[in-house]
Every structure is written in structure tokens, then in C-alpha cells.
Image (tube, helix red, strand yellow):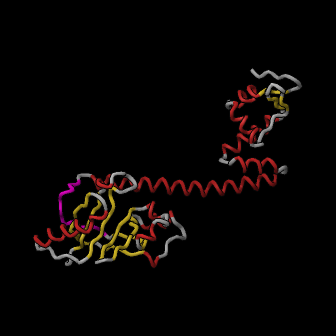
Amino acid sequence: MIVIVEENLLNIGELANLFNINEQTLRYYNKVGLLVPFKKGENGYRKYKIEQIYTLATIRYLRNLDYSIDDIKNYLDMMEYESRISNLTEQYKLLTEKIFRLQNIQKAIQRKTSFVEEKLKGINLEDITVVENERRSYMLLGKEKSIYVNNLFYRYITMVEYRKDKKTFLMYMKDFDEFYHENPGILNKDLVNFVEKGKFLTGYHIGDYEGITLTAERIRKEGEKRNILLEDYFITTNIIDQFIESNRDKYITEIQIPLANN
């Protein structure tokens, strides 16, 4: 039960109980100038006017709408409802963009976990087999020194094409239409290409990326023993990488060499 004392004043505990918040929150609001007590006693007790309930209710309302403390200050300085309606409309737009961004992050997490689980299902890392793949679309990311500033590198599956001394990073797009939806205006169609449907001699490299070329050569030699004619380049796909494994000795990379007679 709220007890009103001293000319309709509430102490900090009464105000906190009314809103089911802790007193520390009110002290913080006081510190940043968001809700300053009407009266402070010599003993440090804080007293709030009953009318400040409405201000605190507005603060709580805006916090529920994901307003920052600074944004709440600006909002409270707006006295006319037209300004506040305009501000709320702008917040709606910002939240819509934030929701879209968070949904894309959610999809990136799901994309990564689903891909790893699918690739590791029933896998034998010692096997070297011929696998037939459907057509795969990818976006050119470029050389290694340029990929780390590209946010797409962190949100999609990474492929690398090795041609002699040239190593090119690619971003695998399993669902082309989904990529367009998630990244409106980002995609340069000139950077999109395809790994055509075909057969690939497939094996796995375990460990740091530095040894991938040697593993690819071992897989190639195994293909030659089986009289399989192969192209002179290969493509790798990260399965277990630095984003989900701290021990580089446990990285797993799929290596695929296209058959020359595809």
C-alpha cells in the first residue's frame, strides 16, 4: 500500500514499489538527470512529487519501446504532442530496421549451424569419393586481404578457389532469392558466378589452412591412381572453422576437385 506523506510526496522506496523497480534504477535516473527528486533531505532521503509518477511512467513506456536514455531525455523535452508523435514514428522506422537486421543475424546463425550439421552427418573424414553436386551460386569476395572488412564474409558460408598460385574467396549462396531479400541493394550482379552442376573428387583436410594445398595434392594423386581425369584447380568449403572452433588442429575443410569430363 502506498502511503502519501509530506504534501503528496513519495519517498524513493514508495516510488520504486509502485513501478516494481529497484531503488538503484531511480538513483541512476537521478544521476543522469532523467528523473530528479523534487526534494532531498539532509539525511540523503529523496522525495518525489506525486506528479512525477507520470514522468516515470513515460520513461518506462519509452524504455519498453527500446529508447535509449539520451533519446528519452530528448523526448521528454518535447512538450507538444505533434513532436512526440513524429518522434514515435521515427522510432518505429528505426525498430523496423533493427528487426530486419536481427532477423538476418538469426538467419546467419541458423545457416551456419544447419550447414555444419548437414555436412558432418555421416561423414567419414578419411574417405575420398566422387560426389555429384547441383549448381551452386556464389559471390566473389576477392583476395584474403580484402575479405575481413566485408560483413558478408561473417554471415555466409565461405568457399575458396585455388588456381595455381591464386587464391580467391567466394561467398556461397544456397538460396539466391533469400540473399536478395536479406541484402537489398548490396549485390553487384557482376560479382555473382556459379559452380556448375557436376562431379567432384571430394576429400577433407583436418587442421590449419596452411596445409590445405598438400591435402589437395594427396587427394589428386588418389584420383590419378583411380584413373580419374581432374581439372587443374580445386574448391574448398569451410565446415569447422575459426568461428566455431578455437583449436586450429580441429578445423575441417572440404576439398573438391572437378572431374575434367563433367
Residue 169 against residue 69 in the figure, above or below: below
Which percent across, then down, holds residue 148? 46, 65
Between residues 83 and 12, which one lies in front from this camera angle? 12
- The residue positioned 85% from the left and 34% from the top of the image is 38
Which percent across, then down, holds residue 225? 10, 71
Give the quadrant of residue 87.
bottom right
The span shown in magenta is 123-134
- The residue positioned 36% from the left and 53% from the top of the image is 114
Which percent across, then down, holds residue 149? 49, 66
Between residues 200 and 33, which one lies in front from this camera angle? 33
Is 233 magenta? The answer is: no
Q: Residue furthest right?
A: 7
Q: Quadrant of the N terminus?
A: top right
Q: In which quarter of the image is the C terminus?
A: bottom left
- The residue positioned 77% from the left and 53% from the top of the image is 85
Which percent across, then down, holds residue 60? 71, 40
